Image (cartoon, rainbow, N blue to C red):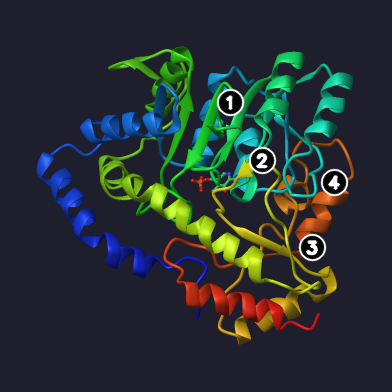
Amino acid sequence: MILLNDFQRQWRDTRDDAMAAFEAVGASGWYILGKRVEGFEQALAAYWRLPHSVGVASGLDAIEIGLRALGCRPGDRVLTTPLSAFATTLAIVKLGAVPVFADCDAHGLLDLDACSRLFASRTDIRLLVPVHLYGHALDPGHLAQLRDRFQLRIVEDCAQSIGAIRGGAPTGLVGQAAATSFYPTKNLGALGDGGALLTADPNIAAAARRLRDYGQSAKYKHDEMGYNSRLDELQAALLERVYLPRLDAWTARRRAVASAYLGSIRNPAVRPMGAPAGSDSCWHLFPVLVAPDRKSAFMAHLRSQGVACAEHYPVLIPDQAALHGVPHELASDCARARAIAHGEVSLPIHPYLTDDEAATVAAACNSWTG
Ligand SMILES: *Cc1c(COP(=O)(O)O)cnc(C)c1O
């Protein structure tokens, strides 16, 4: 079976470095908020071209802590996308804020024109959580224009977009804060959970540092209610020494696989979604669209050809049972997002996928008769 992610291959490649990192942390005798977290935070900030990075326990927490640091309060409206990992909305709802869902564009990204119209008519919505879905970067110029025109506070959800470039810059530089995740399947994945909040604003960074550690501003001094949301030394050491140094090569390999697919999938019944023009995607996922009523048959066909596949995401967030009875708003019928949810299938894409495997995946797509 050609897997969506091949962690055993990754382990064979990274084992020696990982064991050395493990040994170093174990021998140090310091396991929470020490030198390795600091070192990784600095390395990540440098990679991301932002001055501050704060390691937290997950991508979910990074978004929630980012929103809190930006002053999001219970009852505040937060504009976001209906097509994402559930965590994007969960972070908003956990704060008692109210998610407002706008529709997507043809690439599955938040439709920024629709957002602009909404901000113009709804002065009560001034918080935004856009998602650089699939590793495709939203247009930073457009996002910056919205931020300035409507004085928005923005946490960019970069959980899928580490390594993506648009307009010569990484994602996450337009919002006052950027959240990312080190969940193992992410492009920079740990051997467990982790996340980070990145920002140019020292006050936001300081707030995030307090919030991740019970709201402590100094030892035994609690001025606000915080969380236990710390990245641990072990994950930080692995990320800094083993995975981050490989990230550019991994991203390059994902791009090579994506261009192989784009060049060889030639079947009108299987349409690669592609990246928006100008976005040098980091290809966290490789989504294709098929006829919604044939989606499960297509997935069965892929599996019969030895190709694993998945869906991102089959159910819109506002359609999830967990949202029943929870305050939220639909700013549109989300018809485009729903059409993508019903027709999208994700093909295997990861740094250890071979050329032969990519050819097998493309052949499996091309042999689908619709
Ligand atoms: C994975 C993901 C998250 C959540 O990250 P966790 O580390 O799993 O909490 C949030 N948003 C998006 C878009 C994601 O892909």
Determine which residue is flagged by label 4.
334
Residue 44 at x, y percent in the picture? 38, 34
The front one of 163 and 159 is 163
Structural crowding at the residue carrying mark 1, measured as other residues with C-alpha within 10 Å and reported as few (<14), some (14–19) or many (≥20): many
Could you say which disc has been placed on residue 200 in the image? none
Q: CA distance from mark 4 to mark 1?
A: 24 Å
Ranked by sequence position, the earlier of labels 4 and 1 is 1
- In front of the other: label 1 or label 3? 3
Where residue 278 sits in the image (x, y, percent)? 66, 40
Q: CA distance from mark 3 to mark 2?
A: 27 Å
Who comes first in sequence, dot 3 or dot 2? 2
Q: Position of residue 175 (x, y in %)?
A: 60, 24
Q: Which element carries disc 4, helix, strand or loop?
A: loop
The residue under label 2 is: 278
Task: State the SS at label 3.
Answer: helix
User: Pointers 3 and 2 in contact (CB under 8 A)?
Assistant: no
Residue at x 70% of width, y 49% of height = 322
> From mark 1 to mark 3, how far is it between C-alphas?
30 Å
> Disc 4, disc 2: CB below 8 Å?
no
Q: Quadrant of residue 41?
A: top left
